[in-house]
C-alpha cells in the first residue's frame, strides 16, 4: 500500500481513564477504523478468543452440553450457587493440584470469570478500602473496583524479571485498609508463568500484610515454557486465597460463560457462616450460567483426554514462537521475555524510530486503517506505548499480520542517522 497519509484519519481521542477502558470498547473502535476498500482479510489479534481460528476446537466431550439440553432435565432454575454436581466436580478438579481437598461448599459457580471477579471485589469492598492490582492488568479489575468504590493501588510487574511481582512495592502500598492483592497466573496480558518459588514469596508477603490473595487462574494449565503451572491455592494454608477460573480458555469455550469463584482457604477465613451467606445473597442478585451448561461440567472435567490439552499447548507454543520471532524482526517492537503461557504477550513500542506516530493508540488505529490488522493498545491494560498481541491463532494468522506490521513500520520509519542504523542492525 502507498503511504498516502493525507487520506488517513487521525486516531480518535479516547478517554484513557483506566476506570472506563474496556477491551471490547477499544477493539470496536479499531474495527470501525478499518478501510472497507482494503481487499485483504481483516486479522484481529486483539481479543483472546481462540475460537475465531480454525486450529482451536473444544473437546468432543463438550457435546455433553447438547445432550444435557436435549435430555429436557435441565430447563429449570439452578441453585444460586450452582448445581450440586457442578460444584462437586469443580472442587474435585481443582483439588487434583492441591495439598488438601476442597469441598462443594468452597465452590460458587459464576457466569464466566468476569462475574467471579465482580463477586470477589463486591464481597471485599467496604468504605475506605483499597485493593492492590498489578500493572499491567486485565482492565475489568479496574472497572469493577470503580463500581465498588475501591481505591486502586498499582504494583509493577517487573519486565526485566519475566513480569514477576514487585513485592517491595506491594509492601510499600499496603496499609490497614487494604483488602486484597490480585495476581493473574498464567499472565494476561504478559504471557508469563510464575514459579513455585515466586508464588511462595507472594504468599509470605500477603501473610505478613494480613491480606488475602485473589488468584485469577482463567488461563490455568496453559503453560508451555520451562515453568509448570502452579495454582496459588497450593499456599492456601499460608494465606487465604480466592481462586477465580473458568472453562473458557483451557476448553476453548469462552462463549459458554461458565466460571467459578472458589475459597481455597483450608484455614477457614472465608468459611464462616456469615461470609458464606453474603456470597449466596449476592449471587441471588446476579444469577448464574445456563443450567444445561452447568449440567455438562462434571463429564467435561472428568473425561477430557490429556491429548486434547497437549494439542492446545502445542498450537499455543508454535504460534507464540512465530510471534516472538517476527516481533524480533521489527526494529520498533520488542518483547522483554518470550511468552511462557496464556494466549497473549506485551510488546514495547520504540516511538523514537517512527516519524508520524505519537503513541500506542495512534499506532493501532493507523495500523488498522492501513493494514487491516488489529492489536490492542497497551494503555487498555495500563501500559502506555505498548501493545498486546494475542497469539492464540493458527500460524498463518500470526505470520501475516506481523508481516503487514513490519511493512507498516518501514513506511512510517524515521530517517535514521548512521549511528541509529548500526544500533538497529545489531538487534536484527
Image (spheres, grey):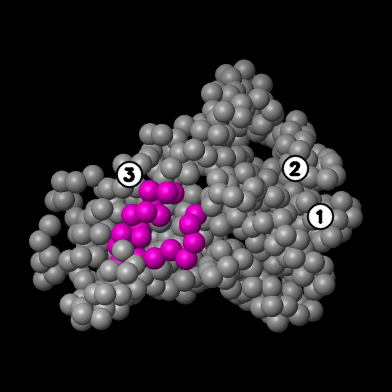
Q: Note whether 353 is above or below 220 in the view shown.
A: below
Mark 2 touches mark 3? (CB < 8 Å): no
Q: Which part of the image, by quadrant, shows the N terminus?
A: bottom left
Say which label, 2 or 1, has the lower sequence index: 2
Q: Secondary structure at mark 3?
A: helix
Q: Residues within 10 Å of mark 1 (few under 14, many from 20)?
A: many
Q: Secondary structure at mark 1?
A: loop
282 sits left or right of 12 in the view: right
Alpha-carbon span between mark 2 and mark 3: 34 Å
Alpha-carbon span between mark 3 and mark 1: 40 Å
Q: Indicate the position of residue 105 as horizontal and vertical percent values.
A: 82, 43
Q: What stretch of residues is rendered in magenta?
A: 320-339
Residue of label 2: 97
Total label count? 3
Q: Note whether 365 is above or below 420 in the view shown.
A: above
Residue of label 1: 236
The residue drawn where x is 72% and y is 60% is 197
The residue drawn where x is 61% and y is 29% is 306
Residue 109 can be seen in this image: yes
6 sits left or right of 199 in the view: left
Say which label, 3 or 1, has the lower sequence index: 1
Amino acid at each position: 500500500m502507498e503511504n498516502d497519509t493525507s487520506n488517513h484519519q487521525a486516531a480518535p481521542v479516547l478517554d484513557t481513564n483506566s476506570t472506563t477502558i474496556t477491551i471490547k470498547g477499544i477493539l470496536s473502535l479499531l474495527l470501525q477504523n478499518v478501510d472497507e476498500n482494503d481487499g485483504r482479510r481483516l486479522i484481529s489479534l486483539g481479543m483472546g478468543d481462540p475460537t475465531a481460528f480454525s486450529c482451536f476446537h473444544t473437546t468432543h466431550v463438550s457435546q455433553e452440553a447438547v445432550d444435557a439440553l436435549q435430555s429436557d432435565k435441565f430447563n429449570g432454575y439452578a441453585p444460586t450457587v450452582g448445581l450440586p454436581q457442578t460444584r462437586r466436580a469443580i472442587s474435585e478438579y481443582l483439588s487434583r493440584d492441591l495439598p488438601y481437598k476442597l469441598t462443594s461448599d468452597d465452590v460458587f459457580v459464576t457466569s464466566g470469570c468476569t462475574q467471579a471477579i465482580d463477586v470477589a471485589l463486591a464481597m471485599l469492598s467496604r468504605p475506605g478500602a483499597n485493593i492492590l492490582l498489578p500493572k499491567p492488568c486485565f482492565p475489568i479489575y479496574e472497572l469493577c473496583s470503580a463500581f465498588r468504590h475501591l481505591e486502586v493501588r498499582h504494583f509493577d510487574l517487573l519486565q526485566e524479571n519475566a513480569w514477576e511481582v514487585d513485592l517491595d512495592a506491594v509492601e510499600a502500598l499496603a496499609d490497614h485498609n487494604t483488602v486484597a492483592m490480585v495476581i493473574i497466573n498464567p499472565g494476561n496480558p504478559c504471557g508469563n508463568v510464575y514459579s513455585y518459588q515466586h508464588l511462595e514469596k507472594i504468599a509470605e508477603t500477603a501473610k505478613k500484610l494480613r491480606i488475602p490473595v485473589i488468584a485469577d487462574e482463567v488461563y490455568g494449565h496453559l503453560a508451555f515454557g520451562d515453568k509448570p503451572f502452579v495454582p496459588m491455592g497450593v499456599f492456601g494454608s499460608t494465606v487465604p486465597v480466592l481462586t477465580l477460573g473458568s472453562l473458557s480458555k483451557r476448553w476453548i469455550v469462552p462463549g459458554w460463560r461458565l466460571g467459578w469463584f472458589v475459597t481455597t482457604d483450608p484455614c477457614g477465613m472465608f468459611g464462616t457462616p456469615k461470609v458464606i451467606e453474603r456470597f449466596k445473597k449476592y449471587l441471588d442478585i446476579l444469577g448464574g450460567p445456563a443450567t444445561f451448561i452447568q449440567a455438562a461440567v462434571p463429564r467435561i472435567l472428568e473425561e477430557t483426554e490429556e491429548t486434547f490439552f497437549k494439542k492446545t499447548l502445542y498450537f499455543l507454543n508454535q504460534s507464540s514462537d512465530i510471534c516472538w520471532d517476527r516481533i524480533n524482526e521489527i526494529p520498533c517492537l520488542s518483547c522483554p521475555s518470550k511468552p511462557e503461557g496464556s494466549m497473549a504477550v506485551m510488546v514495547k513500542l520504540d516511538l523514537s524510530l517512527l516519524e508520524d506516530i505519537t503513541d500506542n493508540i495512534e499506532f493501532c488505529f493507523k495500523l488498522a486503517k492501513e493494514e487491516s490488522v488489529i492489536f490492542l493498545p497497551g494503555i487498555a491494560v495500563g501500559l502506555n506505548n505498548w501493545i498486546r498481541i494475542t497469539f492464540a491463532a493458527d500460524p498463518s494468522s500470526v505470520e501475516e499480520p506481523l508481516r503487514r506490521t513490519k511493512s507498516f513500520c518501514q513506511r512510517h520509519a524515521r530517517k535514521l542517522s548512521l549511528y541509529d542504523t548500526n544500533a538497529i542492525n545489531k538487534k536484527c
